[in-house]
Amino acid sequence: MAKRAVSATDGTPTAAEPPAAPAKITVRGLSKSFPGKNGTVVAVDDLALTIPAGEFFTVVGPSGCGKTTLLRILAGLESATSGEIVVQDSPTDRPSNAMIFQGDSIFPWMSVWDNAAYGLRMRGVDGAHIREVVGHYLDKTGLSKFSEAYPHQLSGGMKQRVSIARAFANDPDVLLMDEPFSALDEQNKTLLQGELLRIWDETKKTVVYITHSVDEAVTLSDRIMVMTAHPGRAKALIDVPFERPRDVIELRSRPEYAAIVYDIWQQLRDEVNRSQGLQLDSEGPGGQAPNPAATRPVV
Amino acid sequence: MSSTVERPPAPQEGIAEAPSGGRSRRTRLGRRGRERLLAATTPVLLLVLWEVAVALGAVDGRFFPAPTAIFARGYELAVSGELLTNIWVSLRRLFLGFWLGLIPGLLLGVSMGLFRPIRAALNPLVSGTYPIPKSALLPLILLIFGFGESSKIVMVAIGVFYPVVLNTTAGVLQIQPIYYDVAANCNASRTQVFRTVALPGAMPSIMTGVELGAGLGLILIAIAEMVGAESGLGFMIWNAWQLFSVETMYVGLLVIAVIGYAMSVLLAEISRRIIPWRSER
């Protein structure tokens, strides 16, 4: 049974981590602040990360902690106030990243096919290649029969599938995902998580994923970072050593799964309370602070 | 283990429910059919009532001539070619004025929608001049452009311009920022963003502006032709007033109404083609 590792948050490997694969994304001293109504608002505060190539890396944090800001900075949609991001071996002939956005992001005025082909078309890729790649990904997302449909005819889950197809079809170096399934119901969410992993398994690109859901983070990722409430700082890094390919439903029956979820919640609980402006301390329902050694399930 | 439930056979489409308490009858029409029938027969019914009222003297035939008299006069005008000439002249002015107003309206609307400085600079001008009743501009237009074709075309253009520019700007502004984010993430160039995001995203609002503008253009051409013209449907109506040929006035009104209706049908059809993604309203 692999050991769970909760490591230091400056990205340096600790004894519990396996020797690091070559770092794909290195973030140092990243900060983002902008002028607000009552002075400067610090969204992200001195963040450091090292993400190896091919890792599925997830950031979990309370609402407003700055995780979406972090992702947008990685995507190049916003600029950092200070700090640096280094991406190793960035290709010149392919896009450096593709983002899967939260909520409705596929163009209502384009068919499913045109939406999925959008990134490729903007790059001027030739028709035959587009047909091949888009056809492949619409197939993998189960949308082949709907290629001429318009978004208003699709369900929420189907729209997100188009979003996934578009991002993967564009063949980016790194995939960035901003809680793509948060607007879906639990059942659809679980199924789509499985589908996402199946599609990702093909190419195993580096992924930076953002979510509120601890379950989702543990289901999908190789490593999870817990972010503090605003201003966002790195609080903990947690390994998720389950083997791949994963069965998203079977995974939840394992005690190790519950243990990791518990660990994350230990880190997250205070942050969520803080983000709500609550002054609660981490007491259990019995009125006593829980004893970590006593209550953690035996692994 | 699951059990099946027997379901009663589904009722057939289009068969009206039997009115309660009455004999059960199967009409082939259904609700949609009945509404269409109502829509078609009501005007006819009104015309018949009108005819009867005039014949009985209940309504003054000098101001509200009998429909049969109107149609007779219409026939005369059609046969003499006068009606068609006037229709053609008005339509030509409407057509030219439409494009003269549409193109600047579209260009300005998109620029104002996409670029904040342009919007800040021009919005007060556009919004400020919009409330001026366009018909009140007619004397000024006649002064500047004279009594020829250009003054009529300019009137139509002004009528088309305002709804188009205002709706286009609004249409571009209501595009959700996430779509621009997607385009940026896909490294789309400025032209590509315009072509694939701004224009299609604004299209439903633009079409609304076009429909409104076309309607306004029709109103203005009728007015413009009443004052400064020697031909056209507006002239025909005004001239009929001066000659006290009331039937001719009604013929003119009827033809304008038909043109307006045809325009809206045409634009709705074009709208359906250009905007197939607009869910059925």
Image (cartoon, coloured by chain):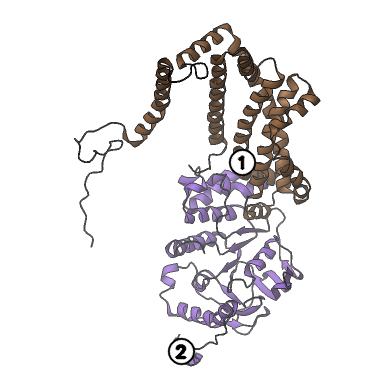
Chain painted brown = B
Quick one: B227 or A170, which is closer to the camera? B227
Q: Is residue A202 above or below residue A81?
A: above
Report x, y in % for residue A173.
65, 59
Report x, y in % for residue A23.
67, 71
Which residue is pictured at 65% across the width and 75% down the height?
A230
Residue A183's disc is none
Chain painted purple = A
Residue indicated by mark 2: A295
Residue indicated by mark 1: B203
Instruction: Give the quadrant of residue B31.
Output: top left
Q: Residues within 10 Å of mark 1 (few under 14, many from 20)?
A: many
Q: Amino acid at mark 1?
A: Met
In the picture as drawn, the residue positioned furthest to the right comes out as B144
Task: Give the alpha-carbon distance from disc 1 to disc 2, as whole Å.
Answer: 60 Å
Chain designation of label 1:
B
Quarter that holds the N terminus of chain B? bottom left
